[in-house]
Image (tube, rainbow, N blue to C red):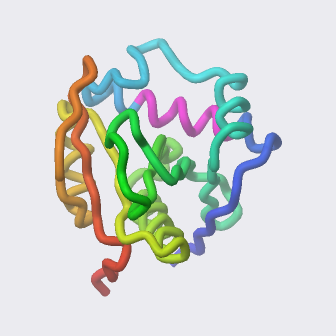
Amino acid sequence: MTSKSIRRATDEDVPVLTQIRNDAHAKKVEYGDYVWGKEGDGFSGQWVRNNVAQKEVYVVEQAGTPVGAFSLDLDDEPHWGHQEPIAVYVHGLCVRKGFNGQGVGSFILDGCAGRANDLNRRFVRLDCAIQNTKLCAYYESLGFIRVGLKDDGYVWSLYERSANRRPIA
């Protein structure tokens, strides 16, 4: 098994994070998911730089190669409304082209569960566009349960999973 690790992103990571985010954007467009923009749109290095400066953005490395990224928030009022501090919220989960299907996404989400436990929070939560049925099915295959919907022009599936869930061996 190839070793994976998660670390906080820095300004030096912006070029590779921009590529990873754009790889994920292209994959979403393939599935008719336009919440990050239409075909031909993408993320600029400046957008990624601002994101890294303003949020907890993380890089996932596999054998020293950056292969994924995500951000982690302690609240998400725009999608979830006001909530008690019982969850962490995953955003922008991205896998670099060529690394899909290698367990990067599940590794990220298990790492987020560990962070939730460290913070004494019970759930890992995320959202995705309901029309991206492949992505919804993927999250459900990892034990996430749809607990609601949010309509703000796009319809979002709101998912959560217990932070104490143990991976199946």
Please state the extent of the stretch shown in magenta in the rendering. 16-26
Kindly give the residue lying farthest to the bottom in the view shown. Answer: 169
Q: Is residue 102 visible?
A: no
At a point 65% along the width and 21% down the height, the residue shown is 44
Residue 43, magenta (yes or no): no
Residue 17, magenta (yes or no): yes
At a point 21% along the width and 61% down the height, the residue shown is 141
Q: Position of residue 50 (x, y in %)?
A: 70, 30
**Looking at the picture, does residue 73 appear above or below residue 78?**
below
**Looking at the picture, does residue 148 appear above or below residue 35?**
below
At a point 71% along the width and 50% down the height, the residue shown is 9
- In the rendered image, the quadrant that contains the C terminus is bottom left
- The reply, left or right, for residue 9 in relation to residue 60 is right
Q: Position of residue 64 (x, y in %)?
A: 70, 63
Instruction: Determine the main secondary structure of the stretch shown in magenta.
Output: helix
Q: Is residue 133 visible?
A: yes
> Could you say which quadrant of the image residue 3 lies in?
bottom right
Q: Position of residue 16 (x, y in %)?
A: 69, 40
Relative to the observer, which residue lies in front, 76 or 16?
A: 76
**Looking at the picture, does residue 51 appear above or below residue 103?**
above
Relative to the observer, which residue lies in front, 60 or 127?
A: 127
- The reply, left or right, for residue 46 in relation to residue 156 is right
At a point 29% along the width and 26% down the height, the residue shown is 33
Kindly give the residue lying farthest to the right in the view shown. Answer: 12
Q: Position of residue 118 (x, y in %)?
A: 54, 76
